[in-house]
Image (cartoon, rainbow, N blue to C red):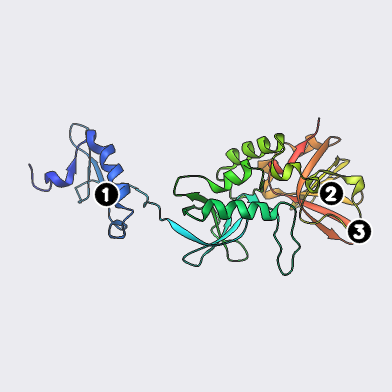
Amino acid sequence: MQENQPLRHQFSEHSAKFLLGLLILWLCLPAWVDAKIYQWQDSNGSEHFSDRFYPDAKIVDVKPGYGYFKVKKVYDGDTVELEDGRKIRLLAINTPEVQHKDKMAEAGGEEAKAWLINKLQHAKVRLEFDVERTDKYGRTLAHLFSDKNEHINLSLVKEGLAEVSIYPPNLLYVNELITAGNKAEQDRLGVWQRPQYAAIPVNNLTSAGHPGWSRLVGKVAAIRNTSKSIYLVFSSRFEARIERQWQSLFPDVNDYLGKTVEVRGWLSKNGNHFSLLIRHSSAIKQKL
């Protein structure tokens, strides 16, 4: 062998996949986290990999292996605390509230919490992050996977225990979640069979509004534009708002004019007027 090409440190192209598989396992260990892997081509065009520097080699971007953690506490269906003290808010979903000191329990909240406790009590979990790592409360935002590779966020949606709630720019697994949510709703699983989550006609909206996550349905009578938002006006008392920065996530909003649609989210009240922020196109559904 030539100098700088020891057998135990150089691998030809046919062994590259095997090497990379080993590297991913090795990188799970702390001693290997900072290791560098080099790739280069010889004069014949064959690719080689090594853990030692070679002239004209480039560093291969191999992501570290996953770390697994025990769940110390389940607060509710979408919030847990890990053994290292991090409070995790599950991305892209919402489960009904459980009883808090300042909040009343919502229908289905205890069911979602019990499901999550049962699922995680003998499991370890890993985290997958999206664009935003934390929310305004300092909680870590993540998709949760069990040591059996079950996507916990997705499973909650499949069971009808959680609604899909997309917050751009966090769009990881959006298509899978929307598909699962539509199926659970069609099959009337979990919250979708509860009268508390039935769609409310806009004209039936009372001065008290509606607590928690809500569904409002009505005809879009007008479209109002400002520099930062687009408003779908349903009545003098209710409108839905789309932020212009996320307009590309929606079809042409003008197509909603004169159509009966359902919007989903949390109501905000200003005097006798209500509005609802729509963050993603999955939160608006056109009725036939």
Numbered badge on residue 37: 1
The amino acid pointed to by label 3 is Asn
Residue sitting nearer the eye, 55 or 64: 64
The residue that appears at 56% across and 52% down in the rendered structure is: 118
**Which residue position is annotated with label 2?**
239
Q: Which tag, 3 or 2, sits closer to the chain's start?
A: 2
The local secondary structure at tag 1 comes to loop
For the residue carrying disc 3, how many other residues have a C-alpha within 10 Å: few (<14), some (14-19), or many (20+)?
A: few
Left/right of residue 99 with respect to residue 63 in the rendered view? right
**Residue in the picture at 29% in, 51% down:** 26
Residue 219, position as x, y percentages in the image: 87, 39
Looking at the image, which is closer to me, 165 or 6? 165
Q: Describe the element under mark 3 as helix, strand or loop.
A: loop
Rounded to the nearest whole Å, what is the CA distance between mark 1 and mark 3?
63 Å
Place residue 16 in its image quadrant.
top left
Q: Amino acid at mark 1?
A: Ile
Q: Are marks 3 and 2 in contact (CB under 8 Å)?
A: no
